[in-house]
Image (cartoon, helix red, strand yellow):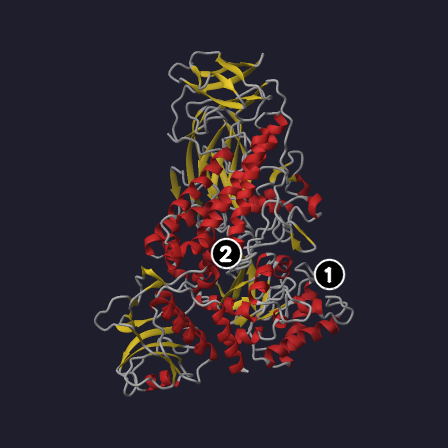
Amino acid sequence: MRHLLAGALAALVLLNPVPAQAAHAEQKATGYISTQAGPGRFPLVARGTAAPIVTSAGDYPGVLRVAGDLRSDLGAATGVSPVAAQDTVPAGRDPIIVGTIGRSTLVDRMIAAGKLDTSGIAGKWETSIQQVVDHPLPGVRRAFVIAGSDQRGTIYGVYDVSRLIGVSPWHFWDDVPVPHADALYALPGRHSQGTPKVKYRGFFVNDENPDTGTWAPAFFGPGKAPGYPGGLNANYYAKVFETMLRLKANYLWPAVWGRAFAEDDPANHATASYYGVVMGTSHEAPMMRGIEEWNRHPAGTGEWSYRRNPDAIKDYWRAGIERMRDQNIEGVVTLGMRGNGDVSLPDGDGIDLMDSIISSQRQILAEEGMLGAPQVQTLYKEVQRYWDQGYRPPDDVTVVFCDDNWGNMRKLPDPSLPPRSGGYGMYYHFDYVGDGRNYKWADTANLVNTWEQLHRAYASGVDRLWVANVGDLKNEEEPTQFFLDYAWNPDAIPLNGIAAWERGYAAQSFGTSLSAPIGEILSRYGVLQSRRKPELLNRRITVDPAKDPRTDPSAVIYDDQGNPFSLTDYAEMDRVVAEWQALAEQATRVRARVPEAWQDVYFQLVYYQVKATANLYELRRAEFTNILYAAQGRAATNALADEAEARFAEDQALNAHYNTALAGGKWKDWQLQPKIGYGNVARYGPNAPWQQPELNNVALPDEIYPYLKRIEVPAEAALGVALDGGDATTLPEFSPWQAQSRQYVDVYNKGTTPFTYRITAGQPWVHVSSATGTVHQQVRAYISVDWKRAPAGVTSVPLKIEGAGSAVLVRAPIRNPGIRPRGFAEANGYVSIPATGFDRRSGSWQVLPGIGKTGDGVTTSSAAAQLSYRVTLTTTGPVKISALLMPRNGSLRYSIAVDGATPQVVDAVAATGANDTTMNRQWARNTSDNVNVTTTTHEIAAAGTHTLTFRALDSAVILQRLIVDTGGVKYSYLGPPTSRRF
C-alpha cells in the first residue's frame, strides 16, 4: 500500500510543481542560507552541480517524500536538480543528509560516532537542526545534515531550508515563482527553529462553497464516493497537507459541508498519514467521523439524537474509532455532541446529558484500545454553558475555548483552577457563516487585533491545540500564516514586531526590495477592511430609543437597504471611499514595479482584494447616493445609477480575470463568492439577512442590492437645495475649533434645462464659494466664516438660494466662543477624543496600533490604571459621554468621571444586552459594527476646561475613543472626526 500510494502521490506532484524560476530575478537568500561562497560554507548547489540528497530507507514515509520536495525546490531555485540516494552516499560527493533520530541509520551512525550532537532536540516534539558536519561518515568529507527529533521535526527542518532558498509556502495556491540563484550555500554552525510552543497547530477548511466546492472537483477531479462528485479527493488534500507542513502546521479539520473526508476518497486518510498530518474533526463531529457520514448512512431511527437513538449513535462512533485504530490514523478525537448542521442539540443542554455522551465515548475508546489517543472537547457556542455550569470533562481531555466567530475570545482559563493534564486549546475564526452575516469573500483580519487575542490566550495557558477556521484557505493566506507563526513561537512576534512580520510575509513571495511597500499596503488594508465586513456594506444598524437593548433584542433594528456610513454628515462616506481609493492607487503604483513573472501572485495576494474592495466602496457610495437623489428628484439621479452599474461591471471584470485568465486559467470559477447582494429576502428567502445569496445551497450570481432607482427627469428647470448634515433648513453649527469638513449647500436641478443661481449670505463675514453660476445638474457651494470679523457668541445667519424662478432660505448657526481652549475643544456639538489622546496616565497601559475603527486602542492589566483627558466645553448642563470599546466578551467594566465627580461604573456587555452564548441581536450589533458603545450622562456646571477620567476595571477592556455629545452628535458609523486639540 505504501509503495502504491507513494507512486500515486508522486504523480500528484506533477499536476502543479513549484513554479519555474524567473531567470532575470536573482535570489538573495537569508538566514543560514546564502548565495555567496565563504569559509566553511557548504555548497548545496554550486558551479552547475547539486549536492546529492541522501535518506535512509527505514525513515518515515513523510520524510522520504519531503526529501523529494527539497530536490524539486532546489531545482526550481537553481535549475539544477540533485540526485537522490538512499542509505549510501554517492562516492566522492558531499551530500545533504535528511533523517530522523531513531529512524535514519545515517543520522544514528553520526550520533553514535559523536559527529552530530542532538542533545538539544532528541526527545523533543517536532524539533530539528540544520548543521554542516565534517567527516560525518566513513569516506564522506562533509555533509549538510537536516535531522529531526521525530517525523514532523525532520519535515519542518527540510521545509525551513526550502523557505530560505525562496520557495513560498503558498507557491501552489498563489502561483509564487521561485527567484533564481546561481548557487546556494549553507552556513556553518548549528541552526534550529526550536520546539513549537503550541503542540497542535492547524486550521479548518470550512464554508467551502461556492469557491473550493466548484473549483477543486474541476481541477483535481471529482470525489470518489459514488453519488458525491463534489467531494474533495486526495489530490486536493495533498496540496493542503504540503502547505500545512511548509507553514509548520500539523493538524487539520477537513471540509464538512456535504463532504465526508473518509469517504470522498478512500486514500484521504492514507494521504494524511503519508504526509505526516494529524487529523481531527470539527467541534460538531465527534469520534473521528464527519457529520456528513451520518447524513449519508443514518441508522436506527435516523435521528442524530443520543436520547432517542442511542444504540445507532454509539455504533456509529465506534466505527470511527475502529477505523482510526485499524488504519493507524494519527488523530485528535473530538468528544461531545452538537446538533446536525452545526446547531444546538435537539435533546437539550443538561449537564447530565453531556456527561452521559462523553462517558459513552470514553467507554468506546477504552474498549477499542484507544483511550490514550489525544481528545478534545470544544466549547463552541452553547456548549460553553456546560463549562460555565460546572461540568468538567476528564482531566486528560483538552478543553478548547472558542472565539465568538468574529475574532473575540469568549472565555479563557480561570487561573484559580488547578492545571489540567489535557491542557487548553483555542478555536478561532477568519471566516464565518451565521449571524449577523456571513463573511467569506476576502481577508478581513486586523493583525493587531488578532495578535492581542492570541497573546491573551497564550498568556492564559492556552497552548495545547490551536485551530483556525480559514474558509477556503486561499484568500486567507496572511492571517492563516500569522496564526501559525504565532502558535509556533509567540515570543518571536511581539506587538512591536508585527510590522516586521508583515514585511517578512511579503518578502517570501516578492523579495526584500518590495517587502516594505507591500507590507505597508497589507497593513493598511487590514485596518480598513476590519472596520466592517464587506458583506455588511448594505446594512445599517440602529437602536430604537423607545426600547431597552439590555433586555429586548427587538430594540436593535436592521436596515438591509441602508448605508452604514453617513452620506450627509461629517463627509463620512466620501472620506472612507477616499481612503480606499488612496490604498488602491498605492497598490497600483507598486504593481507597476512587480516583475512580470510575479504579476499573478501580486494579483492574488495583494491587488485583487485591495482593488475589488475599493471598487465596492465606490459602488456603494454611488448606489446609496442614487437612492437619496431619487427621493429628492435630482437630475443627477440616473448618472449615479450609471456610475454604480459601471462599478458593478468593474467588480465582475476583476472576478472574470480571476476566473478565466489568471495563471493561465488555473483558477477557473474560483471567484464566485457573492458579496454585494446580501439581504434580498424576495430573491432568496428568509435566511437572506445573514446567508449568502443562494438557492438550493448553490450560490447565486451577485447583484446590486438594494436596487438602483431611475427617474423620469422633466425638461423644465426646477430649483432644489440640500444641506450638509441632511437637515432641510439648518446647516451644522460653525465653529473656529471645528474638525469636521466644511459645511456646504448643494444647489441641484430637478429638470434637464440649465438655470442660473445665486447664494446670498446675510452677513459680510460669511463667505460662499461658487456663490453664482449655472446649474446643469448640481453645484456644491462651500460656506466659510471670517472668524476675525465674526461676533462672539452664537449668531444665526440667513442664506438665500435663488434660481429657476424660486428661492429657498436656510440658516447657518455660528458659534464663536469667547474662551481660550485647552485640550480637545468642543465644536459642532461634540468632542471626539482618540484613546491615545490622554494628558496624564497612571499605571501601565499598552497602545494597540490601528486596532480601532479610526485609530489606536489602549488597554491595561493594572487595576489602578487611569487615563485623564482635558477638554474645553462651551456647553453647560447635562452632556453624554460615549465610550467606544472593542466588542470583547465576558466582563467589560470601566468607570468614567468628569472633574473628580464620583465615577460612574459601566458594564459594557450588560449595558448593551450582548450575549455571546445565544448570539442575540445585541451581540450581533456589537460584532457587526466592530465596537461596543455605552453612554453615561454627566453634569457640566460651567463652560471652560474640564477633565475626563477613564479607568478600565477589566483586562479585556480596549478603549478606542471617547465622544462627548453636547447635543450635536449625528449618526455616523465611525463617529464624528477627532476634535482639534489645543
Q: Residues within 10 Å of mark 1 (few under 14, many from 20)?
A: some
Q: Residue at x 57, y 60 (%)?
A: 215
Q: Amino acid at mark 1?
A: Pro
Q: Position of residue 765 (x, y in %)?
A: 42, 14
- Relative vertical location of residue 131 with respect to residue 544 in this rendering, above or below: below
Say which element carries label 2: loop
Q: Which mark is residue 346?
A: 1
Check the picture and name the quadrant holding the C terminus.
Answer: top left
Nearest to the observer: residue 819 or residue 902: 819
Q: Residue furthest bottom?
A: 138
Q: Residue at x 29, y 72 (%)?
A: 48
User: Mark 1 and 2 residues: CB-CB less than 8 Å, in contact?
Assistant: no
Residue 436 seen anywhere in this rendered image of the structure: yes
Q: Residue at x 67, y 76 (%)?
A: 318
Q: Earlier in the sequence, mark 1 or mark 2?
A: 1
Q: Position of residue 584 (x, y in %)?
A: 44, 43
Residue 113: quarter of image: bottom left
For residue 511, side relative to residue 203 (left or right): left
Q: Which mark is residue 534?
A: none
Q: Which mark is residue 476?
A: 2
Q: Nearer the viewer, mark 1 or mark 2?
A: 2
Nearest to the observer: residue 51 or residue 617: 51
CA distance separating discs 1 and 2 = 34 Å
For residue 424, side relative to residue 678 (left or right): left
Q: Amino acid at mark 2?
A: Glu
Residue 193 seen anywhere in this rendered image of the structure: no
Say which element carries label 1: loop
Q: Residue at x 59, y 25 (%)?
A: 634
